[in-house]
């Protein structure tokens, strides 16, 4: 048992680190192949409605026509 | 054997030395577990996808009015208004369609590093070297002095680096140079939860898309990105692969991953379910830090602003750069895609903001 403040606080720090690591070790993980496939599928399923990806006609993009056209 | 049975007390036979050994063993085990599942690279899974074509993205609006470096900006949910903040203490609300300034406030401090629009569009939050986050209700009366209605919400013991409303105007999440993040009740200013785990300044935070539950990610000068449970304050996942400060963190639109921008000149993608880094966006020719990142609506594109004055556009799946955008005349400090994904805004130390589409 430690009986001075400095070593008891460093004990606390290391105990906390060990506790955190134990929590992180318990996480259930999936394969990168599965995770990557899901990321890819999300992109592909939503790509067609991504204006910066597919581009939209100027008439549909409020930033593309010049501002003098009156965007009210 | 339970080293954590009682705080500040060691179990029989344990010393700081045995705890440190256990800590090293657990870290090694964590790496081993993560490595076992590393069966493929993201870009390999993306090999068969059609490559992206040429991108034509230009500056469509330039917002001039700040007298000094623009440090932060945020979009209003109405997809046209923007709030921005700068080194000289000014916070400006703009109509990005017309470039008109609708409101302006002078903060009592310089280096307003953080600003955010409230979900209702009726208020903005900001802060910086004052160590606080304050909320200003936006008045329809242009002559009204906004500063009169200012409400101090958050108090940190060092600078405010980032702030974000949660899904309502009622709560704000903050990150600070004091190494913590915190959740506050706007009305009372009460601290609802604090988040401890970073060992240096926290520079950025981002809330998970609302469908994916109550978590957020933070990144900081300890080179770590931490994922937090907002209710419990618990650090649920941690990632440490960057070689320098993480300046910005941003969730992928599905909520299953997040991207980072760092002073090590790379951006990286971390998948939460695989619990590891799955992509690095870098080139030998890019040697300056990435200050800010954001995804396009589908998550296919990553826009990243750099300290070399450029914005690089990355194909998130293939890991390649698809465009480099020039225009700013100093560091790009902030990049954000509009809520409907039709444009993105960049802010720079050249004191301007640009809208690109």
Image (cartoon, rainbow, N blue to C red):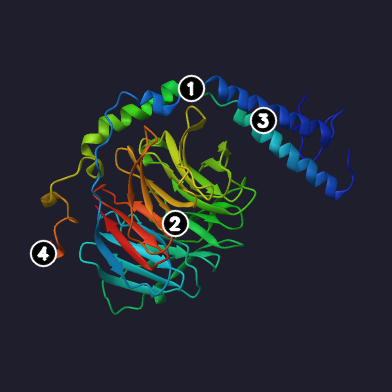
Marks 2 and 1: which is nearer the front? 2
Q: Which mark is residue B185?
A: none
Marks 4 and 2: which is nearer the front? 2
Q: Is B239 above or below relative to B325?
A: above
Q: Residue at coordinates 76% horizontally, 42% vertically from top-left?
A: A12
Callout 4: residue from which chain? A
Q: Which mark is residue A30?
A: 1
Q: Are marks 3 and 1 in contact (CB under 8 Å)?
A: no
- To the question of a shared chain for discs 1 and 4, the answer is yes
Q: Which mark is residue B308?
A: 2
Q: Are marks 1 and 4 in contact (CB under 8 Å)?
A: no
x and y percent of residue B155 in the render? Answer: 56, 62
Callout 3: residue from which chain? B
Q: CA separation, marks 3 and 1?
A: 19 Å
Helix, strand or loop at label 4? It is loop
Callout 2: residue from which chain? B
Q: CA separation, marks 2 and 3?
A: 36 Å
Q: Determine whether, in the image, residue B231 is placed left or right of residue B292.
A: right
User: Which callout, 1 or 4, points at the residue further toward the start of the chain?
Assistant: 1
Return the residue found at the far front.
B285
Q: Is B222 above or below relative to B13?
A: below
- Can you identify the residue that label 3 sits on? B27
Mark 2 surroundings within 10 Å by alpha-carbon count, few (fewer than 14), some (14 through 19), many (20 or more) = some
- Can you identify the residue that label 4 sits on? A70
Q: Residue at coordinates 75% horizontally, 29% vertically from top-left?
A: B22
- To the question of a shared chain for discs 2 and 1, the answer is no
């Amino acid at each position: 048992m430690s009986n001075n403040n400095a070593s008891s606080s460093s004990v606390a720090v290391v105990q906390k680190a060990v506790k955190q690591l134990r929590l992180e070790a318990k996480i259930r993980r999936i394969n990168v192949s599965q995770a990557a496939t899901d990321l890819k599928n999300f992109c592909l399923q939503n790509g067609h409605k991504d204006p910066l990806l597919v581009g939209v006609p100027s008439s549909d993009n409020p930033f593309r026509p010049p501002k003098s056209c009156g965007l009210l | 054997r339970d080293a954590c049975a009682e705080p500040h007390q060691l179990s029989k036979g344990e010393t700081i030395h045995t705890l440190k050994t256990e800590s090293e063993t657990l870290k090694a085990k964590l790496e081993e577990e993560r490595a076992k599942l590393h069966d493929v690279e993201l870009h390999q899974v993306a090999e068969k996808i059609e490559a992206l074509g040429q991108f034509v993205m230009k500056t469509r609006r330039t917002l001039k009015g700040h007298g000094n470096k623009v440090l932060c900006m945020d979009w209003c949910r109405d997809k046209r208004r923007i709030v921005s903040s700068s080194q000289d203490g000014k916070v400006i609300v703009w109509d990005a369609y017309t470039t008109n300034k609708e409101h302006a406030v002078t903060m009592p401090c310089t280096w307003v590093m953080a600003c955010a629009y409230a979900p209702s569009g009726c208020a903005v939050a900001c802060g910086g070297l004052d160590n606080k986050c304050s909320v200003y209700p936006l008045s329809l009366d242009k002559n009204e002095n906004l500063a009169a209605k200012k409400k101090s919400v958050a108090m940190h013991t060092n600078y405010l680096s980032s702030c974000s409303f949660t899904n309502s105007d009622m709560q704000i999440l903050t990150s600070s140079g004091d190494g913590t993040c915190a959740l506050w009740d706007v009305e009372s200013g009460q601290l609802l939860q604090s988040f401890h785990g970073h060992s240096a300044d926290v520079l950025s935070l981002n809330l998970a898309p609302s469908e994916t539950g109550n978590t957020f990610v933070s990144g900081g000068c300890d080179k770590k990105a931490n994922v937090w449970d907002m209710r419990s304050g618990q650090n649920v996942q941690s990632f440490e692969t960057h070689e320098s400060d993480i300046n910005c963190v941003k969730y992928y639109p599905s909520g299953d991953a997040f991207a980072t921008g760092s002073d090590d000149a790379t951006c990286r993608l971390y998948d939460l379910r695989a619990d590891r880094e799955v992509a690095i966006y870098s080139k030998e020719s890019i040697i300056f830090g990435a200050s800010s990142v954001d995804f396009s609506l589908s998550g296919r594109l990553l826009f990243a602003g750099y300290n070399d004055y450029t914005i690089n556009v990355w194909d998130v799946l293939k890991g390649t750069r698809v465009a480099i955008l020039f225009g700013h005349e100093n560091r790009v400090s902030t990049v954000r895609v509009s809520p409907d994904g039709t444009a993105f805004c960049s802010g720079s130390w050249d004191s301007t903001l640009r809208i690109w589409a």
